[in-house]
Image (cartoon, rainbow, N blue to C red):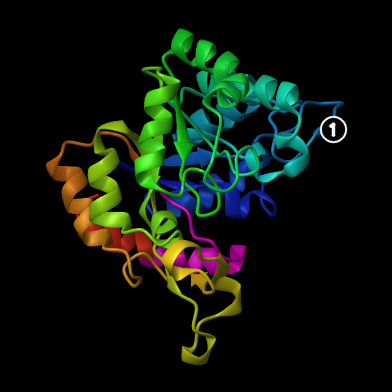
Amino acid sequence: MELAISGEALGSVFPLEKILEIIKAYGVRAIEIWPENIPVQEGKSPIHKRLYANRDAGRAKEILDAAGVKTACVCFGAGFAKELARDKKLFSAELQRAVWTAHELGAKVVNHYCCHVAMGEHYSIDELKEYYAGAIEEAEKYQIYLALENEAHDITKNPVQMREIIEAVGSEYFKTNYDAANYYQAGYEGFPYAYEVLKDMIVHVHIKNGCINHPEHGHKAECKGGAMTGVLAGKDIYYPVAADGAVNVDGLIRRLKKDGYEGFCSLEPHTTPEICLEYYKEETAYLYQRGF
């Protein structure tokens, strides 16, 4: 398995060239690409910060190749924007574009989210297929995985239901991006339980940690996340460095190695760009000590 760093946190403040320079300083040679990481096509304006429309993937590939950095995956976050999630036709078309972008950048995974597509606990598989059918067709054509990431406030918060969704979609190229900290935020045992439920369906992994936010114990406001759900409802999550939270990241790394996982593990600190740099330094050192 290989280590990558998410380009999301720095995407709003640095161009792709600078981000690659930063992650390479920590020995990392793979990046998780988000739309803001890709230069805008000359003479055009971005339609939305969550979309790849009007962005120059060819130029991004040139920048990546020159830096010697691979694309670990392409991320499609339109599910986080209500106005995009409500427009089924646009969402479907742009998810297909994310697959084309992944193909152009040489990535084998498109990480996506269903947050405002299907909140709560209940869903219609037929309606989900309306969002995903076109992208699945393109994913199967290019042999690129659509990896649905679990979140704490939508239908993916329960690992058993996540498995049911993947099985119901019924494509070899529709799998999951596994985030143990997000399962913890939803009140589930992120590892080992959620991992055991989903291990044969995991094609990408996010490495971060979480715990209950306790500002009285010195927790920084910049690292506070959103509301927790399930048995932890009423609390807010806090994002410490990967080694220090309630999720057994050490155990997860050991199991991924033991089970022969060959994909990418992406660091994605949820904090400000300035604190991100502190997290990168500590977390990469921690993971190198564990065999990355």
Q: Is residue 228 above or below residue 264?
A: below
Residue 77: where, in percent of width, then height? 62, 40
Residue type (three-letter) at the residue carrying disc 1: Ser
- Rate crowding at label 1 as few (under 14), some (14 to 19) or many (20 or more) other CA atoms within 10 Å: few
Quarter of the rendering containing residue 285? bottom left
Q: Residue at x 31, y 68 (%)?
A: 243
Residue 6: where, in percent of width, then height? 50, 47
Indicate the secondary structure of the residue bearing disc 1: loop
Q: In this image, 3 relative to 111: left or right? A: left
Q: Nearer the viewer, residue 159 or 26?
A: 159
Q: Nearer the viewer, residue 86 or 91?
A: 86
Question: Is residue 277 magenta-colored?
Answer: yes
Quarter of the rendering containing residue 72? top left
Q: Residue at x 47, y 8 (%)?
A: 141
Question: Is residue 197 magenta-colored?
Answer: no
**Residue annotated with mark 1:** 45
Q: Residue at x 59, y 49 (%)?
A: 8
Residue 133: where, in percent of width, then height? 56, 16
Q: In this image, 260 relative to 119: left or right? A: left
Position of the N terminus, as image quadrant, is: top left
Quarter of the rendering containing residue 163? top left
Does residue 37 show up?
no
Farthest residue toward the bottom?
A: 216
Residue 124: where, in percent of width, then height? 56, 29
Q: Is residue 117 above or below residue 150?
A: above
Bounds of the magenta segment? 265-282
Q: Residue at x 50, y 78 (%)?
A: 213
Q: In this image, 31 relative to 88: left or right? A: left
